[in-house]
Each structure stands twice: as C-alpha cells, then as structure tokens.
Amino acid sequence: MALFTIKPLDSPLAKAVAAPIHGPTVEVHLADSSYLPAGERQRKPTHCVLTPQFVNEAERIHNLTVYEDDVWILSFPKCGTTWTQEMVWLVSHDLDYKTAAEVNLLDRSIFLEFSAFVLNFPGDTIAEVEKANRPRHIQCHLPIALLPKQIWTVRPRLIYCARNPKDATVSFFHHHRHLHGYQGSMQDFLDGILTDQVLFGPQIPHTLDIWNVRQEMNILFIHFEDMKKNMPGVLRRVCKYFNKSYTDQQLAELEKHLSFDVMKTNKSANNSCVLELVESLSGKKVENFQFMRKGKVGAHSEELSPEYIAKLNEYTEKGLLGSDFRFKA
C-alpha cells in the first residue's frame, strides 16, 4: 500500500497561484493515519498542498530517524518561524550569542523540506538533517500527517507557533511574490488561500492538528501575537520547557536581541541568505523586500479590502467549527 495518495491541482486558479520557484502543485494525503496520536478529539489529519518534487522525497521524510534530544520548530509559513527558531536555539544553548552570530540560523536550525520543494535547489536539506550534530534543531512547515513517523514514538521536543490567518496570509502573499516569483494578482492569491490551493495550505487544520495533540505529545504551543505583546511571558514558558533558568537581566537582553528591529538587521538570523539563494536560482534581483518585513499584529487591515477580511473571517470561523482553539488578534 502506498504511504500517500496524490491529487493533482490543475484548476485554473491552482495554476494561477503556482510560482516559478516550485512549479505545479498537488495535494498530498497520508493514506494510513492510524499511527498518529489520538488527540483530544477525533479528527482526520489534514492533507498539504505541495509539489511533485516533494512527493519524490516524502517517503524519505516519513522514514527519517528521530532522536529524543531533537528540537522541532513547527509552523505554517509566515507565522513567526524565524523568530521562534532564534529564540528556541538561544534559550536551549545557554544564550550563546557568539555562536549565534558566527553560524547562520539556517545551519543552526535546518529547514527540513527546503530542497524537497524548491526546483534546482543546490543541496539536500534532508541529508543535512540526517548528518547534523546532536542535539539537532529542525524547522518544518509540514502538517502532522507528513512529519517523520518516529516523532510520535520517540517524542522529541516540539514547538509550534500559530498566527492569525489574516496577517499570515498577507505576509505569505508578499513572500510568495518576492521570493517564490509569483507574478499573479493579490486577488488570485487570496482566492487560492480561501480554496486551499496555495503551497503548504490549508493553514487552519494545520494548526488544529497540532493543537489537538499538544498535551498528549507535550508540545510547546505559542502564538505570534503573544511574542509581540508579551515576550517576557513567552520566554518564561520556553525556559521552563527546556529546564533553563536565567536572570531577569539575561532575559531582558534576550528580549532585546529578539526584538523585530534587531532581528531585521541581524544577518545571521534574518534569512537574508535565502534572498541570495533565490536570486542565484532565478537570476533576478529581489527588489524592495526583506524576509522579516513588518512583524506587526493586525497589519492585514492596511492591505486587505473589507470584502476579503470578511471572507477570511468566514473561512476561519468555518475551519474552527467543533474546536476549542481560537487564533489571537
């Protein structure tokens, strides 16, 4: 029996929202989810919009060896991933700012499926994870159905960062345009989000699948909005999760290091090297874009029409039916 069932996304809209960096998309469904943790409520784990290239690597990821001392940073794209990676790495590495400055975040916290969906990627990020020194820090946008099977028995540390879908969607649009080379309209992109036809989607069940198993799997579940409004509280939770204790002064210094203005200019942690990689793959300069763009809560209201805000609200409410989870604003 095949591990996954694949459904090509060939609608006009799916083709319209595909981007040059990854090409056409498909839905990837896990065929047998019986090994996944049961969770608080019975639910079918979500599929994920990915690429034919990913399908060729999906079994490698499924069978990846997982270690108990692994640290996995899980999220939907544009939900505070980079921020969470830097925070978690420093808390768990005794605030080693020297190494954090010398070794790029992409090398300290490896993006597992990066080479599996970017066309002509110059390397193999799955192999990088396999060869990485322990304890490994691994970043991943895949939903629970597509994560390595051993995660659920080995039980490494798992950290998930959630973000309000309206802000995440606007941020992802700019990311899709400037980094993925998307040439279409914002309207098509938003319609693609609303019909679950954009890469890595759909976001809401991605989040709910993790929320449903967070207690059973001892997942540290955090919100982008809390990091903006109450970083000291988030840092205390992260420290407790890693059994670390720091002075108030040390935590204040860490909060400053993690502030948006500092992170945005920190070449070791702001993913500027991703822009350089995209430029080398596309042969085009990435203009007027920084990976860490605004980092604001509620910024969607500056760019979305009332019509699309209403549509995204309705889409989110429908997606959350039957769950006690709510996104923050």
Image: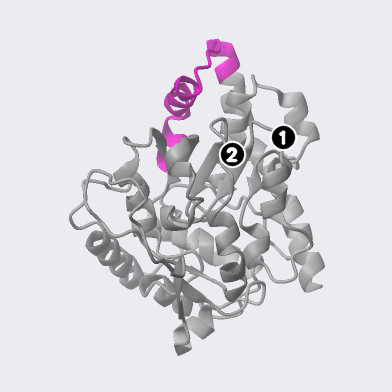
Q: Identify the residue shown where x is 72% and y is 35%.
A: 133
In the image, taking residue 271 as reference, residue 9 lies left or right, namely: left
Where 250 falls versus 133 (above or below)? Answer: above
In the image, taking residue 103 as reference, residue 149 lies left or right, namely: left
Q: What's the magenta region? A: 225-251
Q: Is residue 194 visible?
A: yes
The residue that label 2 is drawn on is 85
Instruction: Point out the frontmost of discs 2 and 1.
Output: 1
Q: Nearer the viewer, residue 226 or 149?
A: 149
- Assign a secondary structure to mark 2: helix
On the image, the x and y values in percent for residue 141 come to: 52, 54
Which mark, residue 322? none
Q: Identify the residue shown where x is 81% and y is 66%.
A: 280
On the image, the x and y values in percent for residue 274 come to: 72, 56
Which mark, residue 133? 1
On the image, the x and y values in percent for residue 60 come to: 60, 58
Gap in angstroms between the C-alphas marked 2 and 1: 17 Å
Residue 241 within the magenta-colored segment of the rendering: yes
- The extreme top residue here reads 247
Residue 11 within the magenta-colored segment of the rendering: no
Of the numbered discs 2 and 1, the one sitting upstream in the chain is 2
Q: Quadrant of the N terminus?
A: bottom left
Mark 2 Cα-neighbour bin, 10 Å: few <14, some 14–19, many ≥20? many
On the image, the x and y values in percent for residue 155 come to: 46, 35
Magenta span dominant secondary structure: helix
In the image, taking residue 212 as reference, residue 31 lies left or right, namely: right
Q: Identify the residue shown where x is 49% and y is 52%.
A: 147
Q: Amino acid at mark 2?
A: Gln
